[in-house]
Structure formats: C-alpha cells, structure tokens
Image (cartoon, rainbow, N blue to C red):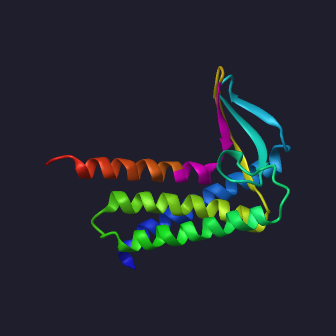
Amino acid sequence: MRKNSPYLALVLFLVGLDQASKALVEAKVGLYETIPLIKGIFNLTHLRNKGAILGLFNAADNRFVPVALGLLAFCAMILVAVYFLRTPAPQKFIRTAFAFIFTGALGNLIDRVCRGYVIDFLEIHVKSFYWPTFNVADSCITIGAVLLVFAVFLRRQPA
C-alpha cells in the first residue's frame, strides 16, 4: 500500500480540485454564462453535459443514457485500476498515467451520480477553431492518455 500512496494522494488532490472548481463555477457563474479570461482565446462558460465526451448524446432525452454512461465510466475505472495494480512499481510514468485517467473518470462519475450531468466550464477557441467545453476531470483523462502514448513510444525506442 505504501508504494501506492503517492498515486492515491494525486487522485484525491485532483478529484478535490475537479469537484471544487465545478462547485465554484456552479455557484458563481450562471448557466450558459460566459466570462472571458483571455479575450478571443479562453473563457469560463458554465454548461451542463448530460452526454459523453464532446457532448455526444447530450440531447438524448432517454433515462438510459446517463445510466449507461455512468456504468461505462465505472467499468473503465475498474479496468484502469486493474492495469494500475498490475503495472510494476518501478514503472512510475505509466502508473501516473493510470492515476490521471482514473481521476478523470471518477470526477465525472461523481457528477453523473450526484447531479445527473457533468459540469463543463473551460472553453478554448482561436479564431474559427473551437474546442468543446471541458473540465478538470476531462483534462486529467487527456493528460493520462498522452502520458500513456509517450510511454508506449519511449518503450519501443532502442536503448
């Protein structure tokens, strides 16, 4: 357990940051309100996403969709936890990647269970390029995925 405590601390810190940022946005920013932080590039925009990544299934008016998405997130968390536990302790880079992915799935699952939707609020756009609104948990999943890709490429390079 001791070898896993830094990862547990990372998960707890990032889930706390995710949930605190969402609570702050929900309390201080009106639904659909946009607050420019860096004009023309970065905004806070309070949205509620009942769907999946990139807003898929957001407009679905079916009670099965949130349940299915929650179950998928829970299954993904179990899968990531199994891979984390099977990854040897010296492979800290990969274990960190799994911790980030687990954190993101957990943060958004907490929203789905407690609120029935995920709060998204970070919005990036440059001229006609627009990235869908996201949150800290989504960022954790992305960071973890990028770390895993790097780990695969670094492992395959000759010594």
Q: Is residue 7 above or below residue 118?
A: below
Q: Position of residue 91 (x, y in %)?
A: 30, 63
Quadrant of the snapshot with the N terminus: bottom left
The residue closer to the viewer here, 7 or 80, is: 80
Left or right side of 88 for 134:
right
Q: Position of residue 128 (x, y in %)?
A: 66, 21
Residue at point 31%, 70% (across, down): 89
Left or right side of 156 for 45:
right
Q: Is residue 30 above or below residue 43?
A: below
Considering every residue shown, the one lying at the far bottom of the view is 1
Considering every residue shown, the one lying at the far top of the view is 127
| Residue 53 is one of the magenta-drawn residues | no
Instruction: Identify the magenta region.
Output: 129-141
Q: Position of residue 98 (x, y in %)?
A: 44, 61
Residue at point 64%, 55% (across, down): 18
Left or right side of 145 for 42:
right
Count numbered badges in the picture.
0
Residue at point 46%, 53% (across, down): 144
Considering every residue shown, the one lying at the far left of the view is 159
The residue closer to the viewer here, 136 or 63, is: 63
Q: Is residue 144 above or below residue 122?
A: below
Residue at point 68%, 53% (across, down): 52
Q: Position of residue 150 (x, y in %)?
A: 35, 47
